[in-house]
Image (cartoon, grey):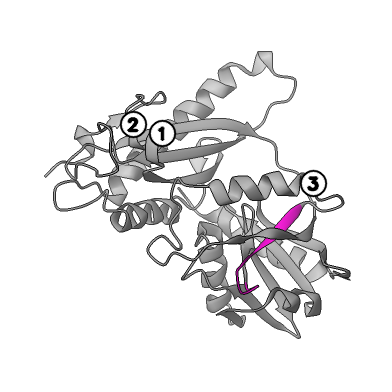
Amino acid sequence: MMNVSDCAVTMVPSLKNRALNYGDGCFSTMLSRKGHIQLLDRHTKRLVNDAKKLKIINSKVSFSIDDLKNLIKTFALESYNAAKQSTETKSVETEWQIVKLLIARGDSERGYAPSMDSAPVFIPSAKDYYPVADHTVSLGLAHMKLAEQSILSGVKHLNRLEQVMAKIELADHEGVDDLILTNAKGLVIELTSSNVFYCIDGIWHTPCVEKSGVNGVMRQYILDYMQRNQIICNVSDMHVSALLSAQTAFSCNAVTQLVPVSHVSIGNESTCYDIGPSQCLAQKISDEIAKEKS
């Protein structure tokens, strides 16, 4: 049985790496403050679960949540300390960094079929992050549709071409900050790089990601928070037109946390949201996350 000590950690993968050739792997993008990762338990659990779904972890290859925690903790702290030492070259100092860990199945010769006993390659990266306080986002509707693939649904795999094309489309949408992505039936799935929650008549809703979309770490945290605090939230399929009936909404991911939505435009119709409830919820969740230890 191969374990994490047999695997390579590199910032420069080889040209034979399956991540480069086939998008064969998974990743997680994390927020680090002073070298400490927020929601580390959830990120590592998601990485291991995704690696199992992709069969990177199998009967011949294994690594644990604790293995990933140790790797990420060490890298995040080293990255922060290195950034601190180079502050004299920066005009603005920040205690925040975005840390990403990419797990590739490994290297292989030509062909889609992988070797099930190839050693995974861990590819970490980090960059400084400058949070923007009290900002909001406005939403439009993407023309492109997300495909349904139950085998990969919820997985943060490396094939992000749908999101790339959505970002290209976003550049052509004037007056909006992000786009709502739907499936072929017009059901809301997610935003270009975030999940979405919206409230209709006092009931929160978030899209189901069982057939497409990403089950984001922050989405999971918010759902758990709502359950603990007896806030009703339905995880369900809902047509995009329902967003026009919402009173408040927010986007969320592990880096930006919760960002209130100011308004949504769908076709010729638009709705302005009350950002107050989303701001209040965002502050409570941010305060709770800040108390957690990585």
Residue under label 3, please give it: 172
Q: Are marks 3 and 2 in contact (CB under 8 Å)?
A: no
Residue lying furthest top: 89
Q: Residues within 10 Å of mark 1 (few under 14, many from 20)?
A: some
Question: For residue 183: magenta?
Answer: yes
Which comes sooner in the sequence, label 1 or label 3?
1
Asked if the residue at tag 1 contacts the one at tag 2, i.e. Cβ–Cβ closer than 8 Å, the answer is: yes
- Left or right: 173, with 99 as reference point: right
Give amino acid for label 3. Asp
Residue range of the region highlighted in magenta in the rendering? 178-187
Q: In this orientation, which residue lies closer to the viewer: 51 or 100? A: 51
Is residue 255 something one can see in this rendering?
no
Please state if 6 lies on the left or on the right of 162 as rendered: left
Q: Residue furthest left?
A: 1
- Residue that label 2 marks: 17
* Magenta highlight: main SS: strand
Disc 1 versus disc 3: distance between alpha carbons? 28 Å
Q: Identify the image quadrant of the N terminus.
A: top left
Is 200 on the left or on the right of 38, as rendered? right
Residue 208 spot, x, y in % from top left = 54, 73
